């Protein structure tokens, strides 16, 4: 680590602790050359996951889009915002833990539906009706029947 005062690369760590949110490590360092102290932060490098849209376009993964879809599916349902936020966090973690540099919107949709099904079946069916583009009542009934068969 280069000293901000004398540009020496020789320093020692005096104190090390995680930040409040736990996303980085704060280190207090002392320059061996000039004796001045400075702070550095160490954090995990974010490697963006690209989402492949149905039309072939690619864009960076955005958990806010997941949050929006879950909020709509859970509208007027007895599902606390904290539970919805946990769903978004779990889904985002699953996407990033896949270690894939690209993921399709259909894969993300399936992950969201798996998680929603565990929390609330009505929210699951709402999400599925938009995601799978239900065209008529028969498609809707087929999804409900599949849900009932799993029980």
Image (cartoon, grey):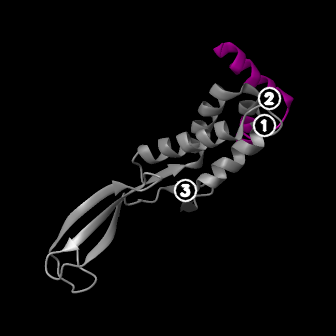
Please give the name of the residue rendered at 37% of the width and 57% of the height, measured from the top-left corner: 44
Mark 1, Cα crowd under 10 Å, few <14 / some 14-19 / many 20+, is some
Give the quadrant of residue 123.
top right
User: Which residue is the site of mark 2?
Assistant: 140
Question: Which residue is at the front of the view, 123 or 132?
Answer: 123
Check residue 150 for magenta coloring.
yes
**Does residue 111 appear left or right of residue 30 in this picture?**
right
Question: Could you say whether the residue bearing mark 1 is in a helix, strand or loop?
Answer: loop
Determine the secondary structure under disc 3: loop
Is label 3 or label 1 in front? 3
**Mark 2 or mark 3: whose residue is earlier in sequence:** 3
Q: Which of disc 1 and disc 3 is earlier in sequence?
A: 3
Label annotation for residue 91: none
**Disc 3 designates what residue?**
61
Q: Residue at x 60, y 32 (%)?
A: 115
What residue sits right under mark 1 in the picture? Answer: 134
Number of callouts in the render?
3
User: In the rendered structure, which disc, 2 or 1, sits on the residue that comes first in sequence?
Assistant: 1
- The residue sitting at the front extreme is 35
User: What is the distance, in whole Å, between disc 2 and disc 1 at their CAs?
Assistant: 6 Å
Numbered disc in front, either 2 or 3: 3
Instruction: Judge by depth and name the residue closer to the eye, 21 or 137.
Output: 21
Image quarter of residue 57: bottom right
- Quarter containing the C terminus: top right
Residue 42 in view:
yes
Local crowd size for mark 3, using a 10 Å CA cut-off: few (<14), some (14–19), many (≥20): many
């Amino acid at each position: 680590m280069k000293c901000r005062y004398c540009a020496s690369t020789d320093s020692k760590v005096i104190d090390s602790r995680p930040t409040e949110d736990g996303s980085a490590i704060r280190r207090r360092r002392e320059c061996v050359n000039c004796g001045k102290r400075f702070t550095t932060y160490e954090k995990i490098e974010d490697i963006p996951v690209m989402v492949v849209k149905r039309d072939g376009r690619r864009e960076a993964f955005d958990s806010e889009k997941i949050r929006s879809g879950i909020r709509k599916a859970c509208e007027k349902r007895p599902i606390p915002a904290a539970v919805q936020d946990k769903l978004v966090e779990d889904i985002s973690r699953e996407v990033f833990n896949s270690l894939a540099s690209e993921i399709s919107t259909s894969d993300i949709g399936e992950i969201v539906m798996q998680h929603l099904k565990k929390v609330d079946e009505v929210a699951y069916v709402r999400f599925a009706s938009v995601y799978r583009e239900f065209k008529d009542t028969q498609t809707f009934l087929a999804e409900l029947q599949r849900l009932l068969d799993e029980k």
